Image (cartoon, rainbow, N blue to C red):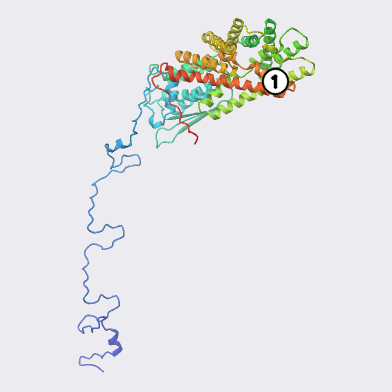
Amino acid sequence: MTDAEGRKPQSDEARSAFVHPSGLMAPADSESSTTSEFAVPDGLAVPKPGTESETTSEFALPDGLDVAPPPAHEPEGSAFSTPRTYSARQAAAFTPPTGVPLVRLTKDVPWQDRMRTMLRMPVTERPAPEPVQRHDESGPAVPRVLDLSLRIGELLLAGGEGAEDVEAAMFAVCRAYGLDRCEPNVTFTLLAVSYQPSLVDDPVTASRTVRRRSPDYTRLAAVYQLVDDLSDDETHVSLEEAYRRLAEIRRNRHPYPGWALTAASGLLAGSASVLVGGGLLVFVAAAVGAMLGDRLAWLCAGRGLPEFYQFTVAATPPAAIGVALTLAHADVKASAVITGGLFALLPGRALVAGVQDGLTGFYITASARLLEVLYFFVGIVIGVLTVLYFGVQLGANLVPDAALVGDPQPVLQIAASLGLSLAFAVLLQQERSTVLVVTLNGGVAWVVYGAMHYTGDISPVASTAVAAGVVGLFGQLLARYRFASALPYTTAAIGPLLPGSATYFGLLGIAQNEVDSGLTSLTKAVALAMAIAIGVNLGSEISRLFLRIGSAEKRRAAKRTRGF
């Protein structure tokens, strides 16, 4: 059926399906009566959509919050640029209560002290570089400057210089050519230096190995003079000129020939035998034994044998001559002969350098140096102990205290100490201009020791420490006066103080199966050696701290923990 307009009437199910959710029938004249569950109910006011998108997020700013507009253009910054919120007035809040210390490095201060001061400072607190030694407009190449510093450090370390002074010299060379952001590192056999141009550039690192050591203080003094010229702003030394002078230093021959060194070994042993109570015959016997040992050591060195075996072989002739004189029932103090031979072999130079490195904080280098001294000492012990053992088996009557019997003879012993220091200076290849000064320094050391030990009846360890302190003090004063190394003025002067007699008595006690007394004497020898090394270092530090010869500022020291 159809209505009047020709449309079919809708069923009840159809009409109920299109009922408006509000319960009202949709008007028949609407465009479409079809609705859904997503349709907006009648009577609910819905804002009209605007032109912009209504899409928001949880990071959108709420309405009503006032935010300052961003600047029109802000340049891109970095981690090292100053923040926009930084204020110069607020910067004072970060200044320490005591203020920022001002570092003054005057030109009258020796370069060693200036470089030590800057090495112990953080890189950011170091003062501006000094006038740069340039050879052209662009400046020297960084690898060549690092190589020059390593070659200079190699000569110093091979000559027996302490690790702290070697680092100071390497840093002085780099700083003289404008490389102020350098960090040198010195161990017993390895030298390294690193340079970083800036915080964003890659560092440049170079290293060098020290394979051979030769005590030549003439060469050491020449290297110090070169570093002093490089550090002086009034002396302009180009990189090529520095290389040329360094090559001349390496090519220079030793100031003393081989026969002079052998004669110096005999003089050293003979003078040492007089110091412990020997006479003219003892002097000659000890000198002959030391010269034979020196020649045998040279022969072993030419064959390529290590230094351990060289010391072992060099220790046998003096001991053999002493035992032979005892078996021949000669009226000679054999103990003085053997003791004099030991004086020529004891590694006093390496011992002082090892203890100095330990006291200044270079523990790895100090351990290696002291281990080297221990090996040399063991070699001497093996050589002497072997001869003494066979001598005892053959019936040699070696009396331990025979060398110390008799009243001290001050004049003769002072002359012997001067001769011993003179011979030691020649063996160390010192400059001839410094031999007389170091000889007098050795005589002063023995006078101080004799006055305290023989006259004042003070223990030998304390007397040795004080005498070594005087040696270190005078040596440092002379070195500062000449702007040179202190080693040539101190090492030879401690020769009369070396524990030769205590070492011999310890070895003799072990050879005669008196182990307790032998170990007691060897312990005394170790204590005397440590007293010498610490006394020399303490005398040098006293001259730096209190006398301030040419120094305007105190040298900074490393801060240590207080038990934690």
Q: Nearer the viewer, residue 137 or 78?
A: 78
- What quarter of the picture does the N terminus occupy? bottom left
Q: Nearer the viewer, residue 5 or 252?
A: 252
**Residue 530, position as x, y percentages in the image:** 58, 22
Describe residue 173's horizontal placement relative to residue 272 as left or right. Answer: left
For this orientation, the residue located farthest to the bottom is 1
SS state under label 1: helix
Residue 253 appears in the picture as rendered: no
For this orientation, the residue located farthest to the right is 394
Describe residue 68's horizontal placement relative to residue 225 as left or right. Answer: left
**Residue 119, position as x, y percentages in the image:** 44, 27
Residue 240 appears in which quarter of the rendering? top left
Residue 494 appears in the picture as rendered: yes
**Residue 486, position as x, y percentages in the image:** 50, 17
Amino acid type indicated by mark 1: Leu
Q: Is residue 108 above or below residue 187?
A: above
Q: Pointer 1: what residue?
A: 507
**Residue 318, position as x, y percentages in the image:** 70, 14
Residue 328 appears in which quarter of the rendering? top right
Describe residue 345's horizontal placement relative to residue 435 as left or right. Answer: right
Q: Which of 144 and 548 is in front in this view?
A: 548
Counting labels gives 1
Q: Which of 344 and 178 is in front in this view?
A: 344
Q: In this view, does 143 lie above or below 300?
A: below
**Label 1: how many residues lie within 10 Å, few (<14), some (14-19) or many (20+)?**
many
For this orientation, the residue located farthest to the front is 457
Q: In this view, does 101 lie above or below 482?
A: below
Residue 510 appears in which quarter of the rendering? top right
